[in-house]
Amino acid sequence: MGMPDTMVSSRPAAYAATIAATSLGFVVVQLDVSIVNVALNRIGAALSMGIGGLQWVVDAYTLAFASLLLAGGALGDRIGARRVFVGGMALFSIASLACGLAQSPWVLIAARAVQGAGAALLMPCSLALLNRAYAADKARRAHAVGLWTAAGGIALSAGPVLGGFMVGSLGWQSIFLVNLPIGAFAIWMAYRFLRETPVEARKPPVDWAGQGLVVVTLFALTGAFIETGSSGWTSWPVVGGLVLAVVAGGLFLLVESRTRAPMFPLSLFASRVPAVTSVVGLAVNLTLYGTIFMLSLYFQQERHFSPELTGLAFLPFMAAVTVSNIAAGRIAATYGPRLPMAIGLFIGAAGFALMALIEADTSYPSLLWRLLFLPVGIGLAVPAMTTALLSSVPTAMSGTASGVLNTVRQSGGAIGVALFGSALALGTIDGMRLAFVGSALAVAGAALCAFLLIRDADHSAE
């Protein structure tokens, strides 16, 4: 007779191995979100890429990840989470090798898109595997999920610093090649310590029509925004991209409203809290990802920081996010999610307003104290945002709601990089001022939505 799943990971060593195996999936995904930014200047010089090309290096990964994230979770339900996790990690690793060997801009961009597809397969399945391993032990599962989340946060924070030293010492290719040993080890760990999840044979088919339309919509929209920097708003690539995005987006909404098992259930937004948290998530990622992209180029191209110094320049920012995230959990537990979410967003909006006042000769210390408003405020808001969402939907819908929120957030990040990069066409300082003023307004608007429309008593029946 087989051993029950819950007994497989009951020993401390096995418990640690299970967390490590699943966390590696989150680590590589988060690492590649942040590590590439400090390499952009070197990549641009090596492959003769302008701002538009560098925007695609970041966004090809983010867009593929965002648009395929829900499909990754759906495939894990249908053919087994471990199988999809391993396949996603293998795809991610092969694409990382292609990135490291790329000799042309379009090869690198295409490989980055494949990386994003691999990330979309492995990340939701890594959490599903962890959830399955401790399904019968809620306390241990909560602790394990906390460690899984912390691993991703550490990877995101360490990315710029690690990337800076790797680019400076080993070249820009090293930030991609480092994924190969991590990926190989993660695959071995998965086969050694993780059990396959049961396959639900009666699940409805994957919504491939909706999946295809969301890919077209996001790539067309983001591509149009990227092209505005070099071609202008009235050029045919921009106008054509926006028209294609509108048509594909309209068809996507039509398909999702009529299909039996929508990938992106529109009914979720009939409820106030999921709608507001999606607006908050969109505003946060759009402004934050755009800021990191813009500052990475500013530090290296305008301030002439080395890659190592650029990574260190981001260290206080990333450390503040981590500390603020920890504090947010305790505040939300005491006061509910509405207060830390609204206050955090207002702090973030104030930070963006202060950043809009920088001059060409602003010193790094003067920049830093303004910049730290952003991670402190957003670090308070994001955990509260997630808590508000999960407390407002039935438990059976929590996975779908989380997937939708993450898709919206990652899409916002890609659009933010496109918009902030295009603003640089006005000149570095003028473009930064415009981007930061827009960010202050967007985040303040999200704060008002959270404060006025969310109540801590908002819960749906289980």
Image (cartoon, rainbow, N blue to C red):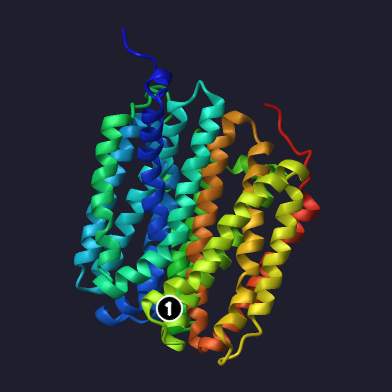
Query: Which image quadrant: the C terminus?
Result: top right
Which residue does the numbered mark 1 point to in the structure image? Answer: 236
Q: Position of residue 198 (x, y in %)?
A: 38, 23
Say whether residue 325 is left or right of residue 12. right
Label 1 environment density (alpha carbons within 10 Å; few <14, some 14–19, many ≥20):
few
Q: Secondary structure at mark 1?
A: helix
Which residue is outermost to the front? 12
Q: Position of residue 69 (x, y in %)?
A: 43, 47
Give the amino acid at mark 1. Answer: Trp
Say whether residue 123 is left or right of residue 359. left
Q: Position of residue 452 (x, y in %)?
A: 80, 54
Q: Residue at x 36, y 67 (%)?
A: 163
Q: Residue at x 41, y 44 (%)?
A: 123
Q: Position of residue 423 (x, y in %)?
A: 52, 81
Residue 112 visible to the viewer: yes
Q: Residue at x 69, y 69 (%)?
A: 349
The residue nearer to you, when weighing 95 against 135, is: 135
Say whether residue 390 is left or right of residue 337. left
Residue 215 visible to the viewer: no
Residue 101 position by quadrant? bottom left
The residue nearer to you, when weighing 261 against 417, is: 417
The residue nearer to you, when weighing 335 against 455, is: 335
Disc tally is 1
Which residue is outermost to the top? 1
Residue 459 position by quadrant? top right
Query: Which image quadrant: the N terminus?
Result: top left
The residue nearer to you, when weighing 31 against 390, is: 31
Vertical relation: 371 (above or below) 59: below
